[in-house]
Image (spheres, rainbow, N blue to C red):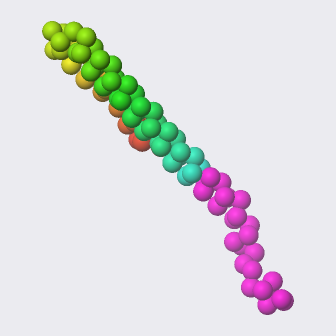
Amino acid sequence: MLEIINSIDLASIATLPTQIAEVSGDIGKGLTAAFGCAAAAIGVGMVGTKAVEAVGRNPGASGKVLVQSILGMALAEAVAFYSLFLY
């Protein structure tokens, strides 16, 4: 038992709170990126769904709907890029 206690490095114990803070920060950054990408995927899916519905209702407006849907998807994907590259 005494050997185990003597083998503990006191310097590593002193830096434990710093290590825990670094790890929890990394976990937070990963969760931020994951939720940002998930939100972007949901947004792109919603834009695509509504674009298909709009073209189904009015096939003559497919050109205008296509342009608007591409812009909407690009803006939704920007959220994913912000969440990935800000951290």
Q: Is residue 54 left or right of residue 84?
A: left
Q: Tell me what residue is drawn at x 27 percent, y 14 percent.
A: 54
Q: Is the residue 38 above or below the residue 49 in the image?
A: below
Q: Percent x, y for residue 75?
A: 34, 25
Seen at 51% across and 48% down, the residue is 30
Q: In percent of the image, x 66 and y 58: which residue is there?
A: 20
The picture places residue 10, in percent across and down from the top left corner, at: 75, 75
Q: Quadrant of residue 78?
A: top left
Is residue 87 highlighted in magenta? no
Whether residue 76 can be seen here: no
Q: Over which residues does the magenta segment extend?
A: 1-24
13 to 67, vertically: above or below? below
Does the magenta segment cover residue 21? yes
Residue at the (29%, 17%) spot, across then down: 53
Towards the viewer: 4 or 51? 51
Quadrant in the picture for the N terminus:
bottom right
